[in-house]
Amino acid sequence: ETFWVSDLSNNTNYQVQAELRYAGPVLLMYVDTGAKVEQADIERSAKEFEQSIYQRNRELFGHELSPGIDGDPRLTVLNTPVQGAGGYFSSADGVVKAVNRYSNEREMFVIAIDSYPLGSPGYGSTLAHEFQHMIEWNVARRSPSWFNEGMSTIAEDMNGYMDDYLGKL
C-alpha cells in the first residue's frame, strides 16, 4: 500500500510503500518496504498494543472514533522512518482526500522506526502516547496542545513505561 507521511521538520509530505505485516483483531501493522524488521518484533509489539495498551488507554481516556472513515474498526500503525518526531497521530488521516489530499483515509498513527525499534520499550511508549492523541481528538478535540501532550505523557506512565522515561533523565 501507498501511504502519505509528514516530514514534520520541513512541513512537507511524501509517499512511502508499506507492506501489511500483521493483521489482528484491533490493529493492522504496516512496515515500510525499505525497512528491515523481524516478524517476531512486529507481532510482539502488536500484541502488546492489543492486549494491554489498547484497553488501558480506553479505560483511562475514552474511545477513538470507530469504525471511522474507512469503515474498519481496526487501527492502522505505519512503521517508517520519520523526520522531526518519534511518531505522530494526524487527524487529517480521518477525512476524505477531497478535504485533504494527503489523507490516508483511515484511523492511524505513524511510528518512527528509526527512533524506536519495534519490540523496544520506547516503541511501546510511543504507541501509548500516540493512541492517546487519537482518543483525545475524538473526545476533546479542542483541548489545548499542552494538555493533550500532558495526557499522552500520562498514557505512557499509566501503561508502565515510566521507567523508560526515567532512564532518559
Image (cartoon, helix red, strand yellow):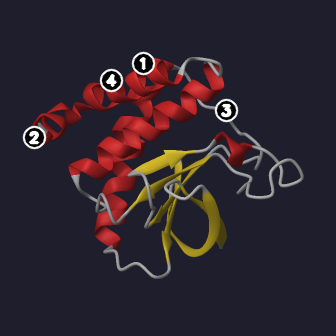
Three-letter code, disc 3: Leu
- Where residue 128 sits: x, y (%)? 38, 38
Foreground tag (4 vs 1):
4
- Where residue 119 sits: x, y (%)? 26, 58
Q: Secondary structure at mark 4?
A: helix
**C-alpha gap between disc 2 and disc 1:** 25 Å
Where is mark 1, residue-wise?
A: 60
Can you say which quadrant of the picture contains the C terminus?
top left
Q: Could you tell me if the residues under marks 4 and 2 are in contact, i.e. CB atoms within 8 Å?
A: no
Foreground tag (2 vs 3):
2
In the rendered image, the vertical position of residue 1 relative to residue 146, given as above or below: below
Where is mark 2, residue-wise?
A: 167
Q: Secondary structure at mark 2?
A: helix
At x 78% / y 44%, what residue is drawn?
95
Three-letter code, disc 2: Gly
Name the N-terminal-most of marks 2 and 3.
3
Name the N-terminal-most of marks 4 and 2.
4
Residue neighbourhood size for the residue with mark 1, other residues' Cα within 10 Å, grouped as few (<14), some (14–19), many (≥20): few
Three-letter code, disc 4: Ile
Where is mark 3, residue-wise?
A: 65
**C-alpha gap between disc 4 and disc 2:** 16 Å
